[in-house]
Amino acid sequence: MKKRHKVLLMLIMLLTLLVGCTSQTEKEGVVEIPESVIKDEETTGTVTVSKENEMILAMNTPTTLHPLYNLPENVGQVLLLVFSPLINIEENGTISSNIAKSWMVNETETAVTITLRDDVKFHDGQPLTTTDVIYTLQQIQQISDSPYKSAVANIASMEPIDTHTLKIVYKQAFSGILQTLFFPVIPKHIYDVKDQTSVILAPIGSGPYVFEDFTASKRMSLKANANYFKGKPLIESVQVKIIPDEESSLYAFKQGLIDVVYTDITEWGKYANSKGTNSYEMASNIYEFVGLNLNKGIFQNANIREALLCGINRQDIVQRYYLEHAIVTDTPISPVSYLYDKNIEIRQYDKEKARFLLTQEGYEKGSNGILVKNGMPFSLNLLVNAENTDRVKTAKVIKELYKEIGIEVNIEEVDKETYFNRITSKQFDAFLGGFKLSYATDLSFALNSNYANGGENYVGYTDQTMNDLLQKAFLATETTKAEAFNKLQQYFITQNPYISLYFKKSVMMTSSQIKGNVKPTPLNIFADVEEWTKS
């Protein structure tokens, strides 16, 4: 890929090397919640007992209620009750209408014309227009660490056509531009204030619920928006408890103290309330894999990598240790994605094939059962971050499975800081890792040769054919997208630059009292909240 694309491709991916199962760390010291909207629970006498037709949620302590600055994921989900996103992204990665009712991409994938609904109003009664959408994008451009940064990384210009139509022009074609349209729209007439004081304002959006008040370290209160463009929510009010971490939220749900919780932990079933729980499981965009140090000669051989894949019983790991809460994959494209090549047949565990491939490469069984070539035993160190119990279990299974085919594995359990430092400095043989991938799919960060040194291509993979396929997928149009991504996946399978394991699943659990048209999506679990009921 050309050098001029390098910075852009790094920016356009919203991704994280996942070193644990905990939620995204809070950004400290961003802002304090304004005193004007804070209530002192001791003086008001407020109690957080559920009222009739009231839903109780939980979120971490927010550092801001401004949705473009907020970083913790569970706070962001709650803020989508107040701020409506421009579009929604479905579980399979396709987009659906929300504030934007329609859109048209030009033939070269370099511009999109968006038509907004004309019945959307902010909570203060002012209409939502193209001015607000453009202002929101301009604000994201100015924020260094917004969770919606991928929305603006490729934008060249924005042009209002009329009150409810705008055109966005991009610096270059990108097959995932529609997925970058997922961001909450904020009102310019409220947030366009001096000295960045917008981060301490009481939140005003166009979402299904209206902000009422915030009680320091205790709760946030919301009420149903009678003028919501999809209809007034059936549940009249929402109380959001401030709970310090995910484990505490899960415990509170089990005790019946909150009505809804969202998580991607494997053993979520143990937190189900004994009185009854409704579970809505979804494929997440968390891709788990074994990364090999491709700077080491042994792993540069594609047959060796194929043998290492065949030697892992991924289906059994998902069944026994992930309790079916993961989907086995052969590529970094999720099997539920609209981009997935449906002709791919997931490769099964085959230790005999693994042995055969290793024999072809000159390995023979030594006296102790370990494979040997030129007097050197096939031995590797497998790095894993100790706090991730799922990965530690997986590492132990892989060790035993590889022993059966004659590969000796030494597991190195380290703290997450050591883990990340060793990966970025390529001080490893192999590691268990994961990427949280963007729905605006571009895998260049992990596979392009430009990022093999100093980038997030931690395994050091270099391959010009792969570079070319990545660029074609990046630049693909609606008519060429399927073919471009199919070819990319087919080549990935022949090379196995990462030993693919699975995509984790996430789940939203609700109390049995929450009913109605409950259809969560991974990025917006409250997508149809106006149709929920509580009985």
Image: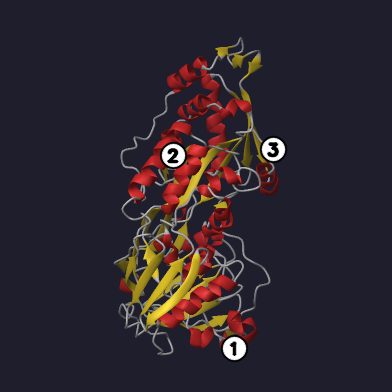
How packed mark 3 is, by other alpha carbons closer than 10 Å (few <14, some 14-19, many 20 or more), is: few
**Which residue type does callout 1 highlight?**
Ser
Q: Which mark is residue 36?
A: 1
Instruction: Answer with mark 2 or mark 3, whichever residue precedes in sequence.
Output: 2
Point out residue 13 in the picture as x, y percentages from the top left corner.
52, 56
Name the one closer to the observer, 30 or 321.
Answer: 30
Q: Is residue 248 above or below residue 314?
A: below
Q: Quadrant of residue 164?
A: bottom left
**Which residue type does callout 3 highlight?**
Gln
- For label 1, the SS is helix
**Which residue type does callout 2 highlight?**
Val
Rounded to the nearest angstrom, the CA distance separating label 2 from label 3 is: 28 Å
Q: Which mark is residue 208?
A: none
What residue sits right under mark 3 in the picture?
427
Q: Is residue 187 above or below residue 79?
A: below
Q: Which mark is residue 318?
A: 2
